[in-house]
Image (spheres, rainbow, N blue to C red):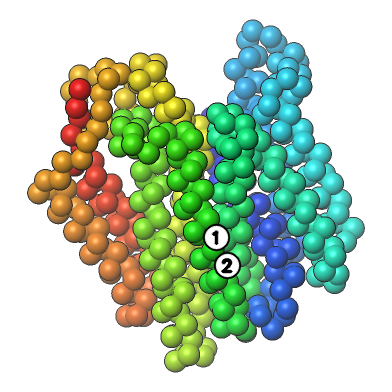
Amino acid sequence: MFFLSIISETLLYICFALLIATYIFSLVPNNRKPNLIVPTNVLLFAIAGIALSSFMPVLQLVLYLYEDYGLGSAFESVLLTFKVGNAWVYTFILSIILGLFITLTDGRKHKAYSLAGLTIVFLLVIGVALSSHASSISPIAGFAIHMMHFLAVTVWVGLLFVVSWFSKNTANWMNFLKWFHVTALSCFILTIISGLLLMNVTNEWNSYTDAWMVSYGQSLLIKHLLIIPLIGYALINGILLKKRLKQQSDFDPRPWTKIEFLVVLLIFAVTGAMSQQSPPTNLESLISYEGISSLFTLFYNGPVHPELGVELMWNGSSILFGVLAIIFLGISIASFSEKMSPAFSFIMSLFVVICGYLAFMQSVQVIN
């Protein structure tokens, strides 16, 4: 069920990203984007994916209550009395409306249809934000921050996803980059700001390293490390790519944007894992109830009690892994200039994350 939940969470992000980006592209003039065709069937599958993947938290709660209340009563109770159930009913109804809207209209012909479709997708995002961890902890601030974070991520990633996998050619790619990079940078800044605010909702900043002792904190660390190669690919696709296109007009940039999207996909997967883990709002209670993360125990095998804390004490091995992470990042970026395979660059970026993780974990010092 855990891995199924990760898949469903990743699918949820992808489906929203696809729908949002498709409508945004339909509003962009043809001379400022490549030739893009997203089939209607793909959009309908995305809508079905939203309805199904957003149902996973409901299913988990129903299965939890099943033995005490029976399937029918548990299902009815979750849908009618639990916030996550109410949010899914809202999402399901809007998904049906959006499916009918896409079937009956064509946003490529009328901009008003695109704006209407984009509005419905935004209403669906509200349903996701309502059922989030942050919203359950802080109903107003958590909801608003999660919605901003979700929108920033899906707009940025959606544009990257659609142009990478659904463009028929590379025509107007320079014109596309002019507005995409401004949009991507704005979304990235919003993602960082909202991400920091979200982190403070679920886990105070001054206890960031302490949270590494539990699964949620480990996932959060890995997610943040994945952002490092993502910034590297943003540099490649934002600056180096422009120079290559000016020098080589027939160069196809799509393999490199696909690699950037794959890194984002990994971030989505880690985010999905975090949604299935208990946030460390009360770290001492969480450690007492769930214990220490199995990943953390690879680097710490001492006594476990709720009052433990984590400090960073840099040493020879942690510095060595940190230097290796920087070297692999340099190789990953330089591989573009050296005209090496994007797959090779992707492997180097994975080494960046692995070495970065080992650098931090080797420097962990547990205090009482």
Give the quarter of the figure containing the N terminus: top right
In the shown orientation, is residue 97 left or right of residue 135?
right
- At x 50% / y 32%, what residue is drawn? 276
Q: Marks 2/1: CA distance?
A: 6 Å
Amino acid type of the residue tagged 1 in the rendering: Cys
The answer to the question of whether label 2 and label 1 lie on touching residues, with beta carbons closer than 8 A, is: yes
- Residue 141: give x, y in percent of width and height: 58, 37
In-front residue for pair 320/178: 178
Q: Is residue 161 visible?
A: no
Amino acid type of the residue tagged 2 in the rendering: Thr
Q: Quadrant of residue 32?
A: bottom right
- Residue 314: give x, y in percent of width and height: 15, 45
Give the SS element for disc 2.
helix
In-front residue for pair 209/361: 209
- Residue 344: give x, y in percent of width and height: 35, 67
Rendered image: mark on residue 183: 2
Give the SS element for disc 1.
helix
Reply above or below: 110 against 295: below
Q: Assess disc 1: are there few (<14), some (14-19) or many (≥20) residues with their C-alpha within 10 Å of its C-alpha.
A: many
Q: Which residue is mark 1?
A: 187
Reply above or below: 142 against 38: above
